[in-house]
Image: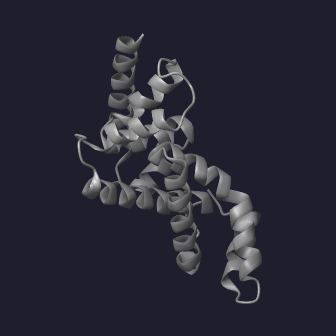
Amino acid sequence: MAVTDIDEQIIQLCSREVDVDKGFDLLMKTYGQRLYQSIRRMVVGAQDAEDVLQETLINAFRAIGDFRRESRLYTWLYAIATRECLRFYRQKKLVLKGFDDEGQWLARTLYAENDLKAETILLKFHEAILLLPEKQRLVFNMRYFDELSYEEISGITGSSVSSLKTNYHYAFERIKKQLRHAV
């Protein structure tokens, strides 16, 4: 997909020293909320999501000159956000104690940050997603919530389309199984 006019405007403004603030503001206004929602689904905690978003935007801003216009700007930003989420997971793994994996920790964070009863199906759905293996969780979030095509996800993750379809299928089946037991 081609770069949009707004993407081109962001790239141009961010590349010029005079218009850097305007470029960063436009980047935030155009993609900040959408990126935040994607990141929040992956890292769960609001403060953690804000930190990861900030790192994502700083890294994108610094590397905007390297953007090759082979995809939409959002796809490129999403790839940076995904790498930042994975870095966040690696850092958390070093300090997590008492949890078998980050999925359990993320599920605990989900319940701690929501006023809803732990019994609600929506929380159970999100918990089931968080308990997926990392690769399946990422693919499921990108496909289900962000409605990215398998080709876009492939560009972000570097995985083959067939591998992504398999991961999505297994994720879907695991979530179904988890929800059957929860109800």
User: Is 137 situated above or below 154?
Assistant: above
The x and y percentages for residue 70 are: 55, 65
- Quadrant of the image containing the N terminus: bottom right
Q: Residue at x 59, y 52 (%)?
A: 36
In the image, 33 versus 98, the foreground residue is 98
The picture quadrant where one finds residue 168 is: top left
User: Is 95 situated above or below 103?
Assistant: below
In the image, 121 versus 159, the foreground residue is 121
The x and y percentages for residue 149 are: 52, 43
User: Is 37 situated above or below 71?
Assistant: above
Left or right of residue 12: residue 176: left
User: Is 1 situated above or below 26?
Assistant: above
In the image, 65 versus 52, the foreground residue is 52
In the image, 25 versus 50, the foreground residue is 50
Q: Residue at x 67, y 52 (%)?
A: 33
- Quadrant of the image containing the C terminus: top left
